[in-house]
Image: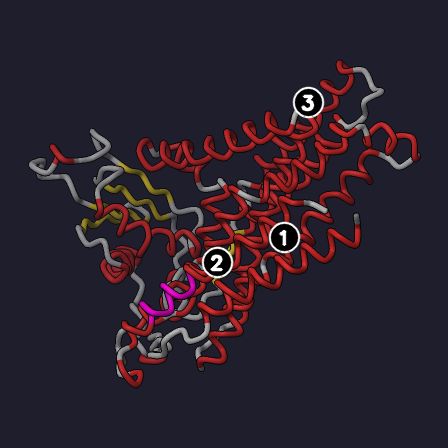
Amino acid sequence: MSKSWWVLLLAIGPLTGMSFIASARTYAEVSGLNGSAAGVGEALAPLSGVWAPTFSACELAAVFLLPFVAIGLVAGDRQSGALRLELQQGMSSAARIAVKALVLLAGWMVAMLAPLSAILLWKIYGGSAYAPELFTLALGHILNAGLTISLACSMASFTEHPSTAAILTLGFTVGTWIVSFFGSIQGGWWERAAGYTPAAMVAQLQRGLVRLDVISIALILTLCGPGLAAIWMRLGVAERRRICESAALVTAVAVAIFACTWLTPSWDSSENRANSFPESDERALRSIREPLSIEVHLAQEDPRRVDLENRALSKLMRILPHTQVRYVAATAIGLFEQSNPGYGEIWYDVAGRKTMSRATTAEGVLEAIYAIAQVKPPVESDDDVFRGHPLAVAPRGAGTLFYVVWPAVFLSSAIVLRRRLI
């Protein structure tokens, strides 16, 4: 009966279609005719070339459409007076909100049929699909939807009107974007906090990177929202008691989140090992027993620092999580520091042995570390090189499926089912 849910289903099809068709066409152009694009390598990885853009439609739907479905399901009972009748049935508020959350999650799984249909089309075209990275990608968007449902349920229970809950939910979402913005500018604790926002979590999982700390925090927050909603759905309980119980729950969640930040295990599920060094280099790095510290003289917004972090340091921290990285810069943009002779230097220190390099590539970082750690660099092998999966095929039939068939099926289903239920 939820009109907002049917709107979500109708919208996610064309959204997915736009993303899939654009990414598939770009992928085909990069692949070249008859697949003659050997050597392009990571540019022909379906995860980054097709799946991440296609599933981005789920991220948009989770932020701008799913909250209204959740708020309508939770706040609608209070508006209609049905909540007072439900409270007389003997079911606990925790069980009631859990059922609603599970129904919302099931509704989201139906909406995810759109990007899953794109996978089927890709296989029909003859494309490659690597199951672990697809599972990781889907997990990221399910967790993101769980966070959205959790937030929307709690806000709908706090407030008296659905529109107020919608404003608070959107405001909280915008707040996480502000944290990400400050993290990219200020660094430090802002940057670390930005790594646990929903957008950062989805971005990591879209690259095939599974971090235990991020997943654990997402699950804790997902359970926290329904917990708060269950507390505030008990209309007959004194407000002061509900405030105290909410404060106790939030405190317990904060302690659990702080504990999760110390979890270091991570896994790379991408086929091209985009988040990892070659296996031979990882074995060599694990043999380093002395503490490693790195001092980087690059500003926060310097493109070289971004390149260094994405290509080398993020991979290094997965192998040596206790590595200390210190950034030194007088400004955030580094525009007026270029004349400083020490700007751009990267100092490596292992057990008092130091060396300096200006290279920001993975090869340059590994070379400097091997030199001062007195570790013999491994022999490069062609087996470690990802050759890519070229596919020079236009996305035939995708427009018909997502722009015509999908809306027609769900529009007719909505009409038929609503008439039967009414």
Residue 105: x %, y % from top left: 67, 50
Q: Is residue 355 above or below residue 272?
A: above
Q: CA distance from mark 2 to mark 3?
A: 34 Å
Identify residue for label 1: 108
Can residue 286 be seen here? no
Which contiguous range is marked in magenta? 19-27
- Residue type at mark 3: give it: Glu
- Residue type at mark 1: give it: Trp
Can residue 113 be seen here? yes
Q: Residue at x 63, y 50 (%)?
A: 6
- Say which label, 3 or 1, has the lower sequence index: 1
Residue 267: x %, y % from top left: 51, 60
Q: Considering the numbered disc 3 on the image, is that residue within a helix, a strand or a loop?
A: loop
Residue 378: x %, y % from top left: 32, 71
Identify residue for label 3: 160
Residue 365: x %, y % from top left: 26, 56
Badge 3 vs badge 1, beta-carbon distance below 8 Å: no
Q: Considering the numbered disc 1 on the image, is that residue within a helix, a strand or a loop?
A: helix
Q: Is residue 206 left or right of residue 80?
A: left
- Residue type at mark 2: give it: Pro
